[in-house]
Structure formats: structure tokens, C-alpha cells
Amino acid sequence: MKTSHMKNIQRRKSERGVTLIEMLVVITIIGLISGLVAVNVIRQGENAKKQIAKTQIGSFTNALGIYKLDTGSYPTTAQGLQALREKPGEMPNWAGPYLPKDVPLDPWGRPYEYKYPGDHGEDPDIISVGPDGQQGGDDIVSWSNK
């Protein structure tokens, strides 16, 4: 009789289920894993935005090259990238628009900065100040393959 009573007690102990501490450990582990995944997803999102900015700057550079072939010069700083969409004043050889759509904002919602003559060679400087919004930080620029 004692053996069957002991087996019942052992069976009840093994059937009790999960303790509160075990549940907290599992929830903590799930939370940590979720946090790591979220950080990686956010980081990939920023990398994707940087790649979009690089692609858009490349598109502007190509359009500016065609603009220069047609007009003999790049748009001035005052004319800016908008000269790729709208004829800037009296420009007899302007054959645009050179972009299929209006000049977009950068992926962070800010206008691209344009400067001609530029400070980095013969071509215009085109800058997206990047996610930090400050020039000189995480900039995406036309003169470098950052």
C-alpha cells in the first residue's frame, strides 16, 4: 500500500505544471530575443534608407550630366535641383525635364542640399544630411562612396 501511495504523490508532483519562476524565465528569454530582433530590423531600415539616398543622389548626378550636355553648364546653387524639372529662366538649350517626377525629399523627409560650384571637384555637391539631420555626421554625399 505504501508503494502505491508514494507513486500517487510522485505522479501529482510531476503533473503540477509550470511554476511562476519558470514562466518568468521563459517570458524574459522571449523578451530578450524580441529586443534583439527589433534592433536588427531598425538597423536594416536605416541601412535601406541610406541606400535609397545613395540611389537618388546617383539619379540626380546622371540627370545633371545630361543637363550639362544640353546647356553647357550645371545649374547654379540658386537654381538647385529644381532646374532638372523646370526651365530656369532663359535657357535656350534646356531640353528637360531631366527627372520623371518632382525632386523628392531624402528618405528622412528633408530636402537634398545642392551646391555648384561644389567644394569637392568639378561636379556639383549633393548632400543628404542623413538620419541625424546634422551636416558632417551621417551624411550621404555625391562625391564619396560612403
Image (cartoon, rainbow, N blue to C red):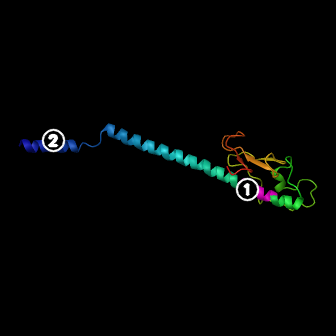
Q: Where is residue 91 in the image (x, y as percent from the top left)?
A: 92, 57
Classify 10 Å Cα crowding around label 2: few (below 14), some (14-19), many (20 and above). few
Q: Where is residue 80 in the image (x, y as percent from the top left)?
A: 83, 49
18 vs 57: above or below: above
Q: Main secondary structure of the magenta part?
A: helix
Which residue is located at x 8 percent, y 43 percent? 3
Closer to the camera in the image, 127 or 111: 127
Which residue bears the numbered disc 2?
Answer: 9
Q: Give the range drawn in magenta.
A: 56-64
- Looking at the picture, which amino acid does disc 1 mark? Gly
Visible residue check, residue 101: no
2 vs 91: above or below: above
**Residue 57 lies in the magenta stretch:** yes
Closer to the camera in the image, 16 or 97: 97
Which residue is located at x 80 percent, y 45 percent? 119
Q: What element carries label 2?
A: helix
Which residue bears the numbered disc 1?
Answer: 58
